[in-house]
Image (cartoon, coloured by chain):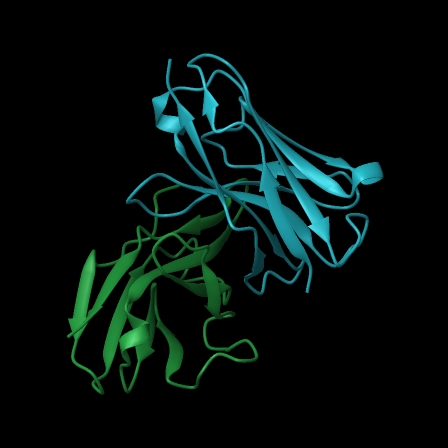
Chain colours: A green, B cyan
Amino acid sequence: QSALTQPASVSGSLGQSITISCTGTSSDVGTYNLVSWYQQHPGKAPKLIIFEGTKRPSGVPNRFSGSKSGNTASLTISGLQAEDEASYHCCSYVGGSTFWVFGGGTTLSVL
Amino acid sequence: QVQLQESGPGLVKPSQTLSLNCSVSGGSISSDTYYWSWIRQPAGKGLEWVGRIYTSGSTNYNPSLKSRVTISVDTSNNRFSLTLSSVTAADTAVYYCATISPRGDGYNNWGQGTLVTVSS
């Protein structure tokens, strides 16, 4: 099972919006509504920010939103803040004998 | 929310076996609330799902690692463990323990991670 495809890096200015894509296949992202997104600051553990494609855990700002179209999931961050500078990872349920697959991660730079 | 803490050797020689523990606090390892999971991350790279265990003892592993990996539960010490045999430099990574509910609604609890280096 190949990793999900994410852009290596994205950038945006303070206050702007950015979108990170996560492309899978009809066997994972396209079939299951079990895409999650994680924020990871350097040297820290990942933190869940989106689950089931569009839902936010308690305490995650509504500036973070998730969506899906076909085999591609997306994470949008609006009103960029300096503390949003981090790596972002997507994850999808695959089923079968593989169960879970992650993307390669995207580094967000806030200019 | 449970708290997780990884522990184990930071250096393992090639061809030997990597062994890590994940101590659980704030909840019971016997709870059916979570799948107890291991995820790893090579330096500068993405996350890789290693495998999981449920309270029933049922395990599932990443097919790419299945022949070398074992995850087990130690109920007396409220922890779960990872062993990875015949390691190579490609197994050098930060290893995280994490939890996910049976509904699959995201890995919501993570340990701080532990770096394991495979080198002679």
Closest to the observer, A14 or A56: A14
On the picture, is B105 further left or further right than A22? right
Rendered position, A96 above or below B31: above
Rendered position, B52 above or below A110: above
Residue B43, picture quadrant: top left
Image quadrant occupied by the N terminus of chain A: top left
Rendered position, A106 above or below A78: above
Q: Position of residue B90 (x, y in %)?
A: 35, 26
Q: Residue drawn at (69%, 39%), measured in percent from left and top?
A: B80
How many numbered marks does the figure carry? Answer: 0
On the picture, is A42 further left or further right than B40? left
Q: Position of residue B57 (x, y in %)?
A: 76, 38
Closest to the observer, B78 or A76: B78
Rendered position, B68 above or below B59: above
Q: Residue drawn at (39%, 76%), measured in percent from left and top?
A: A66
Closest to the observer, B67 or A83: A83
Residue B45, picture quadrant: top left
Image quadrant occupied by the C terminus of chain A: bottom left
Q: Residue furthest toward the right?
A: B76
Q: Residue drawn at (31%, 50%), measured in percent from left and top?
A: A104
Closest to the observer, A79 or B71: A79
Q: Position of residue A69 (x, y in %)?
A: 34, 73
Q: Position of residue A98 (x, y in %)?
A: 50, 42
On the picture, is A51 further left or further right than A8? right
